[in-house]
Amino acid sequence: MRAHALICFLALILYRVLRMRLKANKSEYSVERALEALESVQWHRVKINGESHTGVSVSNLQRKLFKDMEVKPPKQATTA
């Protein structure tokens, strides 16, 4: 029961921090809309000629939301 209460408390704090950051940056999006838009950030990994490559698909809206929330967007691509 204590773990559940802790998780709920952390979720509330995160929600409020996101709301404050969106409001401070005069974002037109609510926390709910921002989280909904960010659900579709995609991470990819492919092998080309035996070499592994990873990348992230982030839309312009998602980039704006990361900026409004003062969060660094995921890095675009790496080679392993």
Image: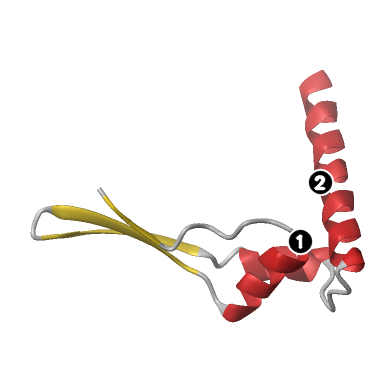
User: What x and y, as percent, mark residue 47?
Assistant: 18, 58
Query: Is 58 above or below relative to 55?
Result: below
Q: How many marks?
A: 2
Q: Nearer the viewer, mark 2 or mark 1?
A: 1
Quarter of the image with the N terminus is top right
Q: Is residue 37 left or right of residue 44?
A: right
Percent position (x, y) of residue 65? 70, 69
Q: Is residue 1 visible?
A: no
- Rendered view: 73 above or below 7: below
Amino acid type for the residue under numbered disc 2: Leu
The quadrant in which residue 67 appears is bottom right
For image coordinates 76% across by 67% down, the residue present is 68
In the image shown, does 72 or 4 lie closer to the viewer?
A: 72
What amino acid type should be assigned to the residue bearing mark 1? Met
* Dot label at residue 14: 2
- For residue 28, which quarter of the picture? bottom right
Residue 42 or 49: which is nearer the viewer? Answer: 49
Numbered tag placed on residue 69 in the rendering: 1
Outermost residue toward the left in this view = 49
Q: Nearer the viewer, residue 3 or 33?
A: 33
Q: Mark 2 touching mark 1, by CB under 8 A?
A: no
Q: How is the image coloured?
A: secondary structure
